[in-house]
Image: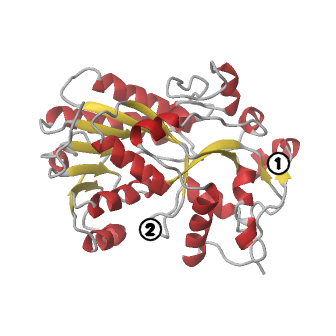
Amino acid sequence: MTAIDSSAPVMVTGATGYVAGQLVKKLLKQGLTVHAPVRDPDKPEKLKYLNEIAAASSGEIKYFKADLLDDGSYDEAMAGCALVFHTASPFKIDVKDPQSELIDPARLGTRNVLQSANRTPEVKRVVLTSSCAAIYGDNADLRTTPDGVFTEETWNTSSSMTHNPYSYSKTVAEKEAWKIAESQSRWDMVVVNPTLVIGPGINPHATSESFNLIKQMGDGTMKTGAPRWGFGAVDVRDLAEAHYNAGFTPTAKGRHIVSGHNTNMFAMSQTLLEKYGEDYPIPRRALPKWLMWVIGPIVDKSITRKAISRNVGLPWIGDNSKSVRELGISYRPLAESMNDFFQQMIDSGLVKKAG
């Protein structure tokens, strides 16, 4: 059991990112001092939203210059921190060189942060943001699980450099993290494995794969239909809560599937129909798998026929009971997350009315 002193500063890597933004907001509201290593602390426009939150909170944020792939660059930011949240990692689907764009940053970045933890005597716990991509590669993998459900015991064995390289990078990075964590005994590691993250971020103009996907449901890209491509989804605000509780719950240990809903792309789009269906081209029908097979790789080169055959029309079923039981997470409704997210895109001008 690891009890964390809440008066000590905490470090959050990737603090300007989508997932970390809501976590930093939670930490600052709780009155904590947050050490935020960023690539360029002298670019105030990148820090604008964090600074606004800090100004309205009882906590304090301090910036440090660091780079994910620069060995030792986190040492200064980590000094004095009992708790480290490592959220920084690349999330890119369309890549030309998986090794340099995904695998190296994920593995070497994780190694860099955890080796800093080994050099920082105050560190008692590291909370690692991994992904359910380290648990599975394709929905078809469900057939090989013991009870037809993905759990924390499951590891992704179907991804590679050529098939689902992003998922492969997350698997490689988490395994590297466990290897380093288990080679020492001063700090413990708690892992958060989220599914697709949705919901409003602190930066209304941010871009991510999540933003792109939901935006396409309302900008006309999917007006002919959305595929029944199964996956899990979690609200970024619930994910922030999971991270916070993973850090400050002494009994927390191991991996945690953090996912509010077993859903699919078409079902998610339908949550937007009631409120936005009249003014925006929300998809009204499911795109047949055969049509997805024909046009998918033409429309988007990052979508392969192998991925379509192993995911579209197949359910994603994950067991989130450990996160509910051990991290005390209560997941908000899918429609609430989707509508809040879509409204933020409208308000920021990312999505415009049809016609």
* Residue at position x 34%, y 36% in the image: 110
Residue pointed to by mark 2: 203
Height in image: 179 above or below 197? above
Give residue 181's position: percent from left, percent from top: 29, 26
Q: Quadrant of residue 224?
A: bottom right
- Is residue 2 found left or right of 144 in the rendered image? left
| Residue under pointer 1 | 295
x 22%, y 67%: residue: 58
Q: Any mark on residue 9, and which?
A: none
| Residue 259 at x, y percent in the picture | 54, 43
Element type at marker 2? loop
Q: Is residue 75 left or right of residue 349?
A: left
> Residue 332: image x %, image y %?
55, 55
Please determine whether, in this image, residue 136 is positioned above or below residue 17.
above
Distance between mark 2 and mark 1 Cα atoms = 33 Å
Q: Nearer the viewer, residue 121 or 267?
A: 267
Side (left or right) of 170 relative to 189: right
Q: Amino acid at mark 2?
A: Asn
Q: What residue lies at 15% left-to-right and 50% top-to-bottom?
A: 8
